[in-house]
Structures are given as C-alpha cells and as structure tokens.
Amino acid sequence: MIFLAPLQGYTEYFFRNAYARHFGGIDLAIAPFVSLVKGKKVKLNHIKDLWPENNRHMKIIPQVMGREPELFITMAKALEDLGYDSINWNLGCPIRQIARKKRGSGLLPWPDEIDQILSEVIPQINIRFSIKTRIGYESVKEAGPLMEVYNRYPLEYLVIHPRIGTQMYEGEVQMDVFEQCLTVSKNPVVYSGDIWNKDIYRDLCSRFPGLKHWMMGRGLFSDLFLPEKITGVFDEKNMNERFWAFQYDLLEAIQERMRREVNVLNKTKELWTKWAGMFKEKDGILAMIYPVKSLSEMRKVLGEVEHNFCLKP
Ligand SMILES: Cc1cc2nc3c(=O)[nH]c(=O)nc-3n(C[C@H](O)[C@H](O)[C@H](O)COP(=O)(O)O)c2cc1C
C-alpha cells in the first residue's frame, strides 16, 4: 500500500481532496496530527480537518499527539463517533518545543512510559491503533527497547521514519537500524523517509522485498506524479493538463479554507516552492510567483506559466 504522509501545514483536507481528484497512486493518508485537549468532550472545531464531510475523496487515519491516557481515550471515542475505525499516535515529531514536553519523538527515550500509556489506552478503545515513530530521540540505541514495547501490542501499522528526533529531517536515513527494526517487528511496518524518486523506491523494494507498505511525503510534493510513477500507473500523455486542472482546483480549495487573501497567497507560494522543480524553468517561475500581491494577479501569473512552460517529462 502507498500512504500519503502526514505533513502538518501541507496535507490538510484541502490538499488531500484536490490531490485525490487529480492523481492516483495513494491508497490511504495519515492526517496531520491533532493535539489531545483537556476536557471530557472534544470540540468539533478542533478536529475540522477530520470531519467526514471534509474527507470524501481520500481515505484517512486520524493522528493524535499527546500522552495523557484519559484524553487519548476521549479523543478516540470522538473519532469513533465521527465514523473512524482507526487512530494513529504521533511518536515522531521532532520539533523542540513539542519534544521538550515529552510529546512526539520527545517521548521515545521513555519506553516504559510509552508501554504504560499503550497498556491503558488500547484496551479501552474500540478502534484499531497504529504508531508513527522514529528510531530514537537522541540515539539509535533507543530503537531496541522501543521495538520490544511496540511488539507487546497488536498494532494495525508501525510507521517507521528511520531518523532520530535530533536529526529533524536532515542527515542520512539510518537504513541498517530500520532493517533491524523491520526484522524484529511483529507488527506490519510502513517505511517513511526520503523516497524522492522511482529509483530510490526501486532500490528500497529490492533491499526489503517483504515490505509491503510505503509512505510518501516530501517526495510527492517535489513530483506530484511520483505515486503514479512508482505504482506504474503514470501516463505522460495529458500530464500538463492534469497538473493545471489540479492547480486551479487546489487554489479554489485553499481559498475556501483560508478566506483571507494574504493567507491564500502565502500558502500558494509556499506550495509552489515545493513543486516548481517539476519545471526546468524553476527559478524563473518562482520569480514570477513570489511578488504576486492579489488573487487575480496570481491567476494571471499561473495562466502565463501554464502557457509558456511545460513540465519536465
Ligand atoms: C513540514 C512537515 C510536517 C510534518 N508533519 C507531520 C505530522 O503532522 N505527523 C507526523 O507523524 N509526521 C509529520 N511529518 C513527518 C512526515 O510524515 C515524514 O515521516 C517525514 O517527512 C519523512 O518522510 P518524507 O521524506 O517522505 O517526507 C512532517 C514532516 C514535515 C517535513
């Protein structure tokens, strides 16, 4: 299976829906995390990204961040009420302000606490449970004890991003450690990290022939056709038309979600920095898009890009 990675700020419902309407190759997305919140009830506005009516086009698993079992259980029940049958726990986020509070990857040096939380939460929820983890926070030595804990529970998936927390998203993915985790895991593993192109994917498949689940994040944003390319459904014919139909659809979806013009423009510019490399003329295109000051101008500039440039084959 091919998963869309959760990328906070990028893969919210406006993107997921527009993407699913124009591109193939993705089977399932893990949504960007929602934080656990105090109280006996979860306010619906807090989980707007997860409302079923906002998720008609792509199947998702909601993800939560936090470590209070009673809040976890309340959130799981709220999600169950919305119709979800599966939840994912974020043990990977490396952002320092979050990790400092022993959340995300900041909890990884405490496998006993993770064990305690899992032993309280899993028996009390009615939906399937999965984890997205790194291979440690400060050291890969944390990976062994973590795998022992994960193996005590029947997880739907164990998504592994083979970096430690302090690496953030830089430096090498540590494939030997990933291999050790994969070898000992009793749960179905999903690989996440640095699949930038088809060749990298092919190499990973030949190194791990038994691995069935792959997650695409930044690679997908640098080439929107990548999931189609790796699953073999890509067709070069009409790729420009499809790319542009997606762009205009997405712009409308962002407008609907954000309303304030300056926010829509900033989000559009930010997204274009990710996929402008799909064109040979990347720098020129960004130089056209960055100075844009209104939505009508943005539409005009995108129209000029569309008529003057073609995607790299
Ligand atoms: C901007 C950004 C936001 C992210 N947000 C989340 C998140 O909300 N939850 C999560 O589990 N991982 C998050 N990640 C990690 C990705 O899901 C993924 O594991 C990581 O980027 C490595 O995969 P990639 O190289 O395919 O992007 C985020 C990564 C980035 C770069």
Image (cartoon, rainbow, N blue to C red):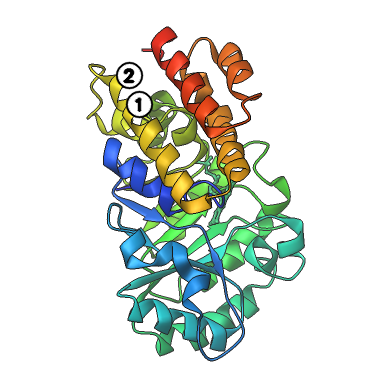
Contact between marks 2 and 1 (CB within 8 A): the answer is yes
Q: Residues within 10 Å of mark 2 (few under 14, many from 20)?
A: some
Q: Work out whether residue 5 or residue 134 is closer to the camera in this orientation and state it.
A: 5
Residue 101: image quadrant is bottom right
**Amino acid of disc 2:** Asn
The reply, left or right, for residue 117 in relation to residue 73 is right
Q: Is residue 69 above or below residue 29?
A: below
Determine the secondary structure under disc 2: helix
What SS does tag 1 mark?
Answer: helix
Q: Position of residue 132 (x, y in %)?
A: 50, 60
Q: Residue at x 46, y 66 (%)?
A: 48
Residue bearing mark 1: 243
Can residue 4 be seen by looking at this rendering? Answer: no
Looking at the rendering, in which quadrant would you find the C terminus? top left
What is the x, y in percent for residue 203?
41, 29
The answer to which of 312 and 119 lies nearer the viewer is: 312
Q: Residue at x 27, y 34 (%)?
A: 231
* Residue depicted at x 59% and y 58%: 92
Residue at left 46%, top 14%? 304
**Mark 2 sits on what residue?**
240
